[in-house]
Amino acid sequence: MYQPVTAEIISIGDELLYGQILDTNSKWLSEEMDKIGIRVVRKTTIGDDKESMRQAFVAASEKVNIVLMTGGLGPTKDDLTKNVLADFFGSQLVLFPQALEDVKRLFESRGRELSDTNRAQAYLPSNCQYIHNEVGTAPGMWFEEKGTIWMSMPGVPHEMKHLMEKAVIPRLKEKFTLPVIYHKLVKTVGIGESWLSDIIGTWEDQLPSHIRLAYLPSLGEVKLRLTGFGENQEAITREVDEQIGSLLPLIEPYVYGYNNDTLSSAIGHLLVQKGKTLALAESCSGGYISHLVTGIPGSSEYFNGAVVPYHNVFKESILGVLETTLVSHGAVSEETVREMAKQVRLKFNADYGLSSSGVAGPGGGTASKPVGLVWIACDDGKSCKTRKLQLTQDRTVNIHLTAVAALNLLRETVIQKSN
């Protein structure tokens, strides 16, 4: 059985807590650790404060095999990492001649003189292994203390990445027997997280301990991430895929793709596969569905065109929606979206016509047609499927959810017509 290797990422700097700088380092580090089979179990962000740093180091030493630290290695007085690490390990700062030589060489290559402040960067905790930073002045420091590997790196992203790629990752691969970590995403639409959980609960309970499931909900969609841990890539990939094979019969109507698939790319593939075309009539979604559809390379093969008749006058004059329909039922109605879907299909000579009309908000709602009320329709020439949506008070969210629901209605229509 594989032995998990765990890591914690500690990001140091007041600027991170103030929100002045986005912490992209920890995201990149997590991705790189995942690639080599090291599981990041915690991320900690702390300011330039000695006691906070000490507490974070104590907590990390009790939890993980590897601690990756970024930040606090500059030449100024607010950069405390070296001092706190020396104190934490019961060592002291001493001059590393090679570190001094390297920083001198860097300054000379840039035509600058080495100041006393920068010279101080060559003083490091006596128990560390010096790691040369070829692209900056702040040195890397590797420690093997308290049963844990510690690596301290500059917070400047390109310097940190250089150290990781050139020195740290190769050392970690030598130091540990690393397991294989394999992820696969199953992407669903048209069902909420809790309902999905109810359907697959028994299947989830029977997963082996080395395969884990995570629910990743987003607007209108839920991703299921299966993560397998093992010693052999081929074996763990096969195991995860077998588990997905037993999952699919439970949720197949909601599954549109895997991993990097998007709803719009999956629908594009489906339309190409069936040799069918699409046209859109968008009111409340304002062209956003068209944007998603045309964002896929090769969409001209199946997308004929779109109309955005935002005002009722143009629903009638351009699309051909009957005046009596608009007067009797209003723009936000099942009757109107039916006619919109049918007329846009005919005008663009498409196999499918997809339409939307609603109250996106934040204003414009009434007692009978409140903000968030949306109707969508999909016409295939023989029948027209409609759906009523009761969404939120947020305009941006409503537009996005309308697009997801409309594309899913199209997906269902294409699949059912093919069966």
Image (cartoon, helix red, strand yellow):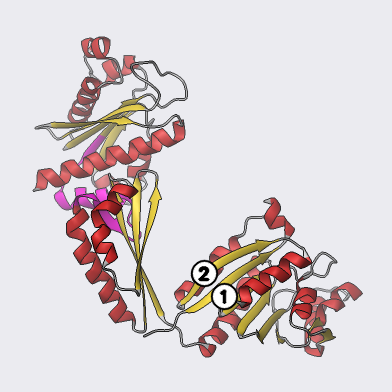
Label 1 is placed on what type of residue? Lys
Q: Position of residue 183 (x, y in %)?
A: 36, 68
**Secondary structure state at the residue bearing disc 2:** strand
**Residue beneath the point at 19% across and 43% down:** 412
Q: Is residue 267 magenta?
A: yes
Residue at mark 2: 41
Query: Can residue 322 be seen here?
Result: yes
Q: Is residue 394 left or right of residue 324?
A: right
Query: Can residue 20 be seen here?
Result: no
Looking at the image, which is closer to me, 305 or 159? 159
In this view, 109 is above or below 269: below
Q: Residues within 10 Å of mark 2 (few under 14, many from 20)?
A: few
Residue at mark 1: 63
**Secondary structure state at the residue bearing disc 1:** loop
Q: Position of residue 125 (x, y in %)?
A: 78, 83
In this view, 414 is above or below 394: below
Q: Is residue 297 left or right of residue 152?
A: left
Looking at the image, which is closer to me, 371 or 295? 371
In this view, 115 is above or below 374: below
Label 2 is placed on what type of residue? Val
The reply to whether dot 1 and dot 2 touch (C-beta < 8 Å) is yes
- Nearest to N terminus: mark 1 or mark 2: 2
Q: CA distance from mark 1 to mark 2?
A: 9 Å
Give the magenta-colored segment's residue range: 253-279
